[in-house]
Image: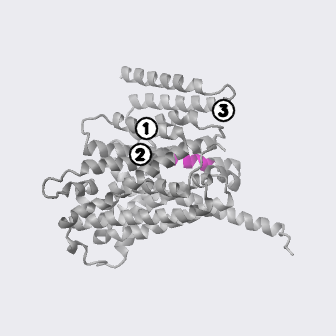
């Protein structure tokens, strides 16, 4: 096996939480509000169905091939050449989305705090830090998640300071136009939640494999809670005008003012958010590097860490001409693009694996145990 | 523009000098993968310097998923 490190299921859950939430907090509230209106806080709950579904599929596939990742078992399921093609599509998706995530990070940091810094400095700095993490291996990534993610997950607690500004009447009437708006609004969060299926690359390296499914479910539940809290706060704070903000969560933290001297908390929040973004980029980057090494049957993934980081930087610049174009891509294309790779391909693989197993059992009946 | 190309080339050469001694003699496949990926990166970087508006992966995916994207626009 290429990766010799082992992580615990708990660390895996901690790594997956910011992998979904870190960029979802930027885009999801305002985009969901456009579709779902006042019912936007219900949408992540419907969206979670896709999260649970991807988790279930990936876990079933893991039970069939406990030692292998999706890049490796796709070859076992549908043959060597088609498996390599599926792997290539998967790797292309990972490279493209790593670039897009880095771009989202860089755009956000530039828009919020460093307006005069050239993009390649912001982006290159982050990729360099992530490259050293990936170079150190999975155990280091797990430990980093253990240190940073609890801090990242505690940011909703700061919303307590916002309570005086929240208007409870913004939330009623709940489900004014029936269930449909909130279900349609779930199109956006479900794209992000399907990224949970990245655990297929981590499951083979777990120390306690029997707990993998349990911690996966817990991490999806925490993700929903996080998104629901953020959506409720944005809704109560802005009402339906939330759609007009580029980064509603950041602006929400700007509202915090306790006794007029405890202000500008957004600086602290962005520091914490960068930790989450760091884990997210590292997870995607690590999965991309490890997947490429497995796809090429290399004995070690370390030599290709920096070349791939260079490619990620280039895709990050190449991904979109400007912020508007990227925003439109994230709003209209990615809710279909992400699940089609992260949920649909594993689903097809699982179906084929089950059918193949049934046919094999039919052809050579298993000797019945006395 | 020529300086950007120069800077990129220097960066790539430094990357190779940094990474090459770490690889062992018998890691032929790793060396091949490393060289291919670095060459791809260098070529793409040079292309992006001269044609920054080159249609990229995002445009390709956008074309593929456009019919679905129209549903929620």
Can residue A167 be seen in the rendering of this structure? yes
Which mark identifies residue A65?
Answer: none
Residue at (39% x, 62% y) in the render: A188
Residue on which the image places disc 2: A278
* SS at badge 2: helix
Residue at (22% x, 61% y) in the render: A161
Magenta segment main secondary structure: helix
Q: Quadrant of residue A34?
A: bottom left
Residue at (38% x, 35% y) in the render: A125
Q: Quadrant of residue A242?
A: bottom left
Letter of the chain that mark 2 sits on in the rendering:
A
- In whole angstroms, how far apart are the C-alphas of marks 1 and 3? 27 Å
Task: Give above or below for B16 relative to A66.
Answer: above
Task: Give above or below for B7 relative to A235.
Answer: above
Can residue B60 be seen in the rendering of this structure? no
**Residue A14 lies in the magenta-colored region:** no
With B43 as the anchor, is A225 left or right in this view? left
Viewer-proximal residue, A182 or A85?
A182
Residue on which the image places disc 3: B29
Residue A214: horizontal and vertical position, in percent?
Answer: 55, 65
Letter of the chain that mark 1 sits on in the rendering:
A
- In whole angstroms, how far apart are the C-alphas of marks 2 and 1? 8 Å
Residue at (26% x, 66% y) in the render: A235
Q: Residue furthest left?
A: A260
Could you tell me if the residues under marks 2 and 3 are in contact, i.e. CB atoms within 8 Å?
no
Circle nearer the viewer, 1 or 3: 1
With A123 as the anchor, is A159 left or right in this view? left
* SS at badge 1: helix
Residue on which the image places disc 1: A129
Coloring basis for residues:
one colour
Dot 3 surroundings within 10 Å: few (below 14), some, or many (20 or more)? some
- In whole angstroms, how far apart are the C-alphas of marks 2 and 3? 30 Å
């Amino acid at each position: 096996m290429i990766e010799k490190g082992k992580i615990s299921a708990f660390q895996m859950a901690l790594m997956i939480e910011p992998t979904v939430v870190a960029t979802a907090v930027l885009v999801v509230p305002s985009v969901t509000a456009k579709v779902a209106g006042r019912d936007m806080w219900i949408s992540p709950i419907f969206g979670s169905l896709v999260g649970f579904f991807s988790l279930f599929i990936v876990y079933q596939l893991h039970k069939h091939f406990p030692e292998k990742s999706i890049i490796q078992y796709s070859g076992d399921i549908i043959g060597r050449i088609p498996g390599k093609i599926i792997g290539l599509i998967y790797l292309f998706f990972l490279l493209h989305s790593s670039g897009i995530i880095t771009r989202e990070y860089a755009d956000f940091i530039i828009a919020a705090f460093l307006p005069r810094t050239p993009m390649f400095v912001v982006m290159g700095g982050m990729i360099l830090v992530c490259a050293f993490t990936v170079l150190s291996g999975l155990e280091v990534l797990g430990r980093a998640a253990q240190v940073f993610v609890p801090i990242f997950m505690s940011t909703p607690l700061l919303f307590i300071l916002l309570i005086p500004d929240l208007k409870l009447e913004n939330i009623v009437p709940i489900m004014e136009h029936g269930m449909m708006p909130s279900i349609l609004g779930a199109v956006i969060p479900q794209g992000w939640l399907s990224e949970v299926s990245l655990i297929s690359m981590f499951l083979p390296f777990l120390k306690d494999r029997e707990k993998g499914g349990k911690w996966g479910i817990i991490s999806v539940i925490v993700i929903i809670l996080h998104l629901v809290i953020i959506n409720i706060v944005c809704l109560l704070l802005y009402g339906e005008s939330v759609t007009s903000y580029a980064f509603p969560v950041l602006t929400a933290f700007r509202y915090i003012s306790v006794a007029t001297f405890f202000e500008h908390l957004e600086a602290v929040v962005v520091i914490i958010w960068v930790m989450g973004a760091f884990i997210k980029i590292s997870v995607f980057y690590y999965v991309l590097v490890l997947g490429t090494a497995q796809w090429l049957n290399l004995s070690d993934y370390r030599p290709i860490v920096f070349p791939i980081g260079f490619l990620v930087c280039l895709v990050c610049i190449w991904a979109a001409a400007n912020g508007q174009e990227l925003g439109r891509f994230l709003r209209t294309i990615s809710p279909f693009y992400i699940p089609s790779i992260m949920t649909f391909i594993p689903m097809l693989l699982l179906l084929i694996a089950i059918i193949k197993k049934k046919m094999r059992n039919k052809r050579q009946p298993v000797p019945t145990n006395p | 523009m020529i300086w950007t190309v120069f800077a990129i080339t220097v960066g790539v050469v430094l990357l190779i000098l940094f990474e090459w001694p770490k690889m062992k003699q018998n890691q032929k496949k790793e060396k091949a993968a490393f060289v291919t990926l670095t060459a791809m990166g260098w070529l793409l970087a040079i292309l992006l310097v001269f044609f920054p508006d080159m249609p990229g992966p995002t445009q390709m995916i956008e074309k593929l998923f456009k019919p679905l994207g129209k549903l929620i626009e």
